[in-house]
Amino acid sequence: LALLSATLATRAPKHMPKFVFSRSESPITVPLSVNVVLVGFGDHASPSSFRLNAPEFEQYLTQVMPDHHPTLVEVGEKLHVSYEVWYDVAHATDKQTEALAHEIQAGMRKSSEQQPANTITGEGGASSNGGMVPVYYVHVEGSLEKALDATFQQALDQSYHVAGSDDSHAPNQERAYGLLIINMDKNRIAPSDQDTSTSPDKSGSYAYRYVMGSGRANSGSDTFVTKGRFAVADLSAGPSQFGSSQAGEGAVVQSSLPRSYHKQWKSPNMSLRFRAELANIVISAVMYLFAPDIQFDALDFSERVLVPLIVFRNHLFYNPLEKGNSFSIDVAKIESEIQRMAMPGQQVQVITGLQGLSEHERISIALRKSTKSDTVHESHGGKYQATSNLYIDSKSLFQELKESSDYLASGLISSSPVLSHTYFPDFTGDGNELKSSNGKKGSGKWAMGTRVLPVYVFSLMDELRPLLFDTKTPYAISKEAVLVVQTGDDLTLPFFTGTKPLKDTLRDPTASIIAGVGAALGGLMPPHRRYAQSHQKLTSNYLWAHGHNAFGPFSNTSGFSQISIDSILMNSVISRLDASVERVSDALLRMDDFADKYLYDPLGVGISEGKPLGLLERLQKRGQSDSGPLLVSYETLRELHDDLLELEKKMSQHVETLYMQEPAKVHQLSDEIFKRASAFHAHSIEVLAAAEERVECCSVQHAVVKRHRWSMWIRALLIGLIAACLVALVAFLNPQRRTRLKPKYKD
């Protein structure tokens, strides 16, 4: 009864399978190949529990997570598209391991930080410095980055290029995604200033972390995302600790990774647990990096994208758009990154403008109304002291700016006749709004295939200036606009790294602008955030927060990795496929409603004649005494059937192209599928509307059909046959899956 009640509570069709309308039943599956390269996990790895058999671990990963179903965070629902994950595990050679160890050792630089020795070994302090050991920073940029890339690519070559194999249908190796997992001998890579005379084992006498970039957050880590298409996890580094200081969720601590020099892994019976924890690292990379959720619906068909960068300042100390000072916005870097985000054939243009905040009363009032105060009570010497921090309510400010975006952008566009003619041929230039040729207000944002995404930068220097948004970041994002705050402050963020709070500067908002545009334009999610369906909310895991991403708070770079850039294209493709399924499903649901109302003899003649009827047969079959034209003609049904067959053909081609990973073809095919799905939807509605019009003057009567005592079983059988009929009609929604074989790559 509970199951029946739950079923009836949803909009469930009566004559078709569940996957037609349910997002939890994913009808479209796309392939995702993840390559795992193991460095230092061979037959002689130490500890012994870290010795892995590559084929066995590959099979284990397939059993643990064979597929992944991402979510559209904007609505909190699963997409109609899921990933079928193929894993390929390979060992790096001893020569590759030795070359990488040499580069890691050469890149170590001693820092001012120290770390307790027992966090490395799990034993009591054994160092001569009161249990504290020095921390070395390994800078990734330069020769180490090249060595990591070479190790990853060479491992792929040796694993996949098998003599005599047919690589004609293999995906492009240049677009291979992967995870490089490292287990180094710390005695081999020990820095030169480490004294080996007292003890040959120096595994617990020092710690090292990877750092990347400069000028932003000062934080090191054991895991990071490279600028290419792979990430790195070093189990001999650290242990590093970082995360949010306001909640324990998602923080990276000593136990987040299996540390190779911790005493718990020296036991020989820890192999199964180690394999499980290592698989968890791979799975987290899949969910947060390679197949992340989509923040906003990326259904964008614009041929051109215009990004007005509007700076509002309440001071005259500096001009953020001028080069040469520590507050300068790197406009060239922003343009370069946005160009990388563009779809194939899409034009992108960035325009800038500087405005005095006092000159725009509406904007100034909106900012002041959106500024809130967060009060924290802390105990000092037995007395409570209240500390107030100002922040910006992003939702309130977005709402206030929504009505102002048109006239602000129009001022920048009208100042350039060439720009206004290129992007808006019918642009009025009156400073009030962007108008289309018919003069309709607001439609200009998408006029002539142009999308306008304004970016508002608030450069503030007054005493009562807010420092962050309510998201605890210096930026806020919506589908329609991006908000960024710039101050001259070096502030303490609500995050920690090691034993210290995380500090950052709000002088240069370049990274915040790029992050906001990436999320608004491409639906990107920060690599530490995803939507948990079980909790119905966003959750955090900061394991992959370091490296090449502009979102912060731990990354020191202002650009995106190639993984994120590829995700923007994939988000667009998935959004088109998802919308296509929505349109076809809506058309089929309308047919279901029509059939439910006008269905001919659902349990009568068909059973008595021994010929159960399908849905389409009932739409065109009539009784012996009926006369007049059919509600839905044979020709019309044939057209609808042919449309579905064409969609099925296109879908098969699309899955093949996704497997080959050809961006231009993938984008083009997704457009064609969406157009055909939209045409099918429109055609179906037109056919049903015409049929409804034919019976407007008639009344519908339902007669009671004679039942047999076995009618319940017959009804069950008939419903099953109807479902099978509908499955055949919408077969394109569930293309045949490939046999799980190890993908082989070609150059």
Image (cartoon, rainbow, N blue to C red):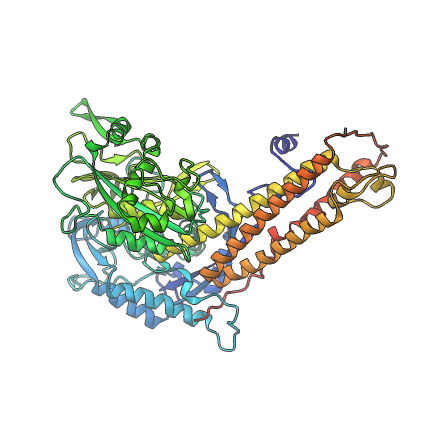
Q: Quadrant of residue 315?
A: top left
**Residue sitting at 63 percent across and 45 percent down?**
683
x, y percent for residue 33: 47, 60
Q: Is residue 628 left or right of residue 432?
A: right
**Residue sitting at 66 percent across and 32 percent down?**
4
Q: Is 134 situated above or below 150?
A: above
Q: Nearer the viewer, residue 612 or 249?
A: 612
Q: Quadrant of residue 138?
A: bottom left
Q: Is residue 654 left or right of residue 528?
A: right
Q: Is residue 485 left or right of residue 5?
A: left
Q: How many marks?
A: 0
The residue positioned farthest toward the bottom in the image shown: 164
The quadrant in which the C terminus is found is: bottom left
The residue positioned farthest toward the top in the image shown: 383
The quadrant in which the N terminus is found is: top right
Q: Is 385 situated above or below 283?
A: above
Q: Nearer the viewer, residue 429 or 192?
A: 429
x, y percent for residue 181: 36, 59
Residue 241 in sight? no
**Residue sitting at 41 percent across and 60 percent down?**
177
Q: Is residue 365 left or right of residue 93?
A: left
x, y percent for residue 302: 43, 49
Residue 293 in sight? yes
x, y percent for residue 654: 54, 58
